Amino acid sequence: MALKQKIDKGVTTAGAVSATPDTASPPSQARVLPPIRTHGGLPLIDALRLRHSTREYDNRALPVRLLSELLWAAFGINRSETGDRTAPYWRHVMVIDIYVAMADGVWIYAPGQHELLPCLATDIRAATGLQDFVSEAPVELVYVAHGERMRDVVAEDQRLYASVDAAFIGQNVYLFCASEGLGTVFRGAFDPKKLAQAMKLDDRQFITFVQTVGYPKGWTDPAS
Ligand SMILES: Cc1cc2nc3c(=O)[nH]c(=O)nc-3n(C[C@H](O)[C@H](O)[C@H](O)COP(=O)(O)O)c2cc1C
């Protein structure tokens, strides 16, 4: 399916996304992410032992291989036959899309194709939070809930279920980062209006939480 169709279609089934592209700056190509490892990483108990929040970051970019595995760990497809995900989700409805804010713009993770769909060509990282490190770290994951996919649910419950979905994704990201020596912090401190405006979200979409990911300050490459 062509990129424009994929975005316009507003899909609610497994592995697909809906989004409003930035019409002011026409999207370029989708970025296909490299395949993920099928084994590896730290044993679970070690990752749990190392899990913590980080608030000081280096500004170096994440290699695309790590970004690919980070997004798969967060909310990728782990059962190809059903399109189900690495995190549980409310009523089998894909409410949350992960928007990835980086220096080169905002992208939407499309788990079905395991690719990034272009959304905005601007660097909005500074608008994703109230703490200094948000414009320093290379990746801000913005967990956007699509209220239009939660039919017959009052606003309060939409918030509740979408927040729980985001929290499961957030813990996957914490464990992946612990395993890979990356820093991360799950964040509720952001200006929701300002961020929704910067992301050009529509009225039915709302931001649950944001999660920073990057190399911790002072990180040195163990391979060098
Ligand atoms: C719902 C929620 C919102 C949070 N919001 C922020 C935030 O806005 N900024 C921040 O620096 N940390 C935030 N945190 C991270 C917590 O402060 C952190 O998990 C807690 O202090 C325990 O530290 P640890 O994660 O290192 O164990 C948030 C955590 C949760 C669960």
Image (cartoon, rainbow, N blue to C red):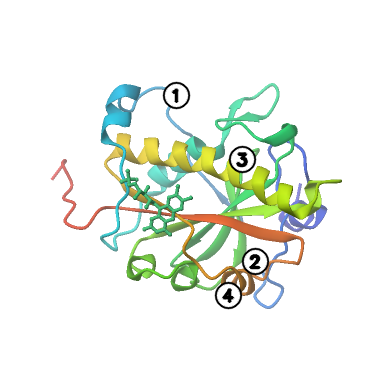
**Residue drawn at (69%, 36%) of the image:** 90
Q: Position of residue 169 (x, y in %)?
A: 52, 40
**Residue drawn at (38%, 35%) of the image:** 175
Marker disc for residue 27: 2
Q: Quadrant of residue 44?
A: top left
Label 3 C-beta lies within 8 Å of the nearest ligand 1 atom? no
Q: Dot 4 lies on which element?
A: helix
Q: CA distance from mark 1 to mark 4?
A: 39 Å
Q: Where is mark 1, residue-wise?
A: 38
Q: Where is mark 4, residue-wise?
A: 194
> Of the residues under marks 1 and 4, which one precedes in the sequence?
1
Mark 1: amino acid:
Thr
Nearest to the eye among marks 4 and 3: give it: 4
Mark 3: amino acid:
Pro
Q: Dot 3 lies on which element?
A: loop
Q: CA distance from mark 2 to mark 4?
A: 22 Å
Mark 1 closeness class: few <14, some 14–19, many ≥20 residues within 10 Å: few
Determine whether label 1 and label 3 are within 8 Å by CB: no
Q: Dot 2 lies on which element?
A: loop
Task: Tell me if 78 is positioned left or right of 40 in this view.
Answer: right
Task: Tell me if 187 is positioned left or right of 218 in this view.
Answer: right
Mark 3 closeness class: few <14, some 14–19, many ≥20 residues within 10 Å: many
Q: Dot 1 lies on which element?
A: loop
Mark 2: amino acid:
Pro
> Of the residues under marks 2 and 3, which one precedes in the sequence?
2
Nearest to the eye among marks 2 and 4: give it: 4
Mark 4: amino acid:
Lys
> Of the residues under marks 2 and 4, which one precedes in the sequence?
2
